[in-house]
Image: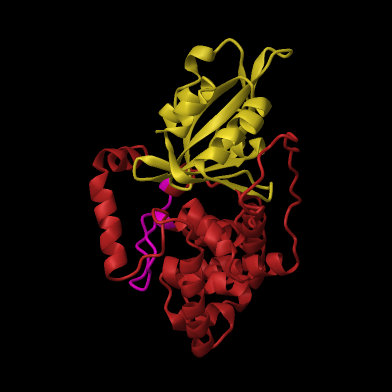
Chain colours: A red, B yellow
Amino acid sequence: MADQALLDRARSGDEAAFAELVKPHRRELHPHCYRLLGSFDDADDALQETLLAARRGLPAFQARASVRTWLYRIATNTCLNLVRKAARRPQTTEPLPATAPVPAGSNEVTWLQPYPDKLLDDLPDDDPGPEARVERNEAVSLAFVTALQLLSPRARAVLILRDVLGFTVREVAGILGSTEEAVAMTLSRARATLRGHTPSPGAPVPRLPGPERARRTEWRAAWPRLWARMTSMRS
Amino acid sequence: MARRLAAALGAHDVDAVVSLLAEDIRIAMPPFPAIWQGRERAARFLTEVAFRLVPEARFAETRANNQPALAVYTRDQAAGIWRGSGLLVITLRGDQIAGLTRFESHTLRRFGLPRMLPGSSLGEWAARP
């Protein structure tokens, strides 16, 4: 919960106070926008818009929710608006040689961009809520971010808010201006769709109770050298 | 794995690259709306696309999406430099590469990687940023 004095100063138009108020959260909002949009460039735009909207909306902020939840609400809805307006940055691509082999299928997520690990390493080590089901490391993997893009924007937002960030269904409903029943229904469909889009057996999948988790644990145990290298490279 | 892949790609050694790949390897290069799947297509993709577009390559290791990745630089002989030509993100499954996703070169700056390397600093290209 934000310091009341800080909040009052920010409300009165103090730029430095506003910056201090949002500082603990703005870094984690960027990967949130990236998951929602699949594009680093679009996430940049969305974050800028989010901060502008937050400053505009601060006088109306009731402090019933935490500053963090309030910012997630603005960021999520900003991203959903961007998708709705199709305000994505244009993509250009180089032509392939005529002799290129025939593709096996189409890549629907043409706007996907990579996300640098160094921006994730710097994030505050905030534990997601107990409701989170997707491990932090997996929640940014290409397979997961790609699968997310195949959900409807709203379903994507519900799944990220609940299963990645660990907001409760009630909080998610508040963020999206929806009802708990509608969120619960969207969530269960989104989880099923996401499982269907997980491309291969070794690809990161949403954390599930029971056998699925056990299998992944075995997988990690089987490749300690590889795993050690993957994790040590992060430090 | 990133280092082995870089060595095999740099040498244009198709067999060595394919030996690192899973049977159902998926290759994508967004925003190109296509996926190539399987070792046989991957081999043809290398000779017909990758090695043609990037005839001479240098690589720098980095990480993206919590996965190993290679920044790819191609030689620009006229300018005497190595020009960033893309980012190759590796999806591992066990000790095999299950996915290779190639992104456009403008994504490199997000990684603090230079868009070009001077022709004279080849000794340092393999260093991690």
Outermost front residue:
B40
Between B40 and B21, the one nearer to me in the picture: B40
Residue stretch rendered in magenta on the structure: A121-138
Q: Position of A213 compared to B119: left or right? A: left
The reply to whether residue B51 is visible in this rendering is yes
Q: In this view, does A64 lie above or below A72?
A: below
Examine the rendering and report whether any part of residue B6 can be seen.
Answer: no
Give me the residue at 47% from left, 79% from top: A188
Q: Where residue A60 sits in the image (x, y, percent)? A: 62, 78
Q: Whole-percent x and y of residue B80?
A: 68, 12
Quarter of the image for the N terminus of chain A: give it: bottom left
Residue visible at 42% across and 78% down? A168
Task: Name the outermost residue toward the top.
Answer: B120
User: The C terminus of chain A lies in which quarter of the figure?
Assistant: top left
| Tally of marks | 0
Q: Residue at x 50, y 89 (%)?
A: A181
Relative depth, front residue between A91 and B111: A91
A125 to B55, vertically: above or below: below
Magenta run includes residue A132: yes
The answer to whether B79 is drawn above or below residue A223 in the figure is: above
Quarter location, residue B102: top right
Dividing the picture into quarters, in which one does residue A109 lie?
bottom right
Magenta stretch, main secondary structure, is: loop
Residue closest to the eye, B119 or A77: B119
**Whole-percent x and y of residue A136?**
39, 57
Counting from the top left corner in percent of width and height, residue A197 is at: 51, 64
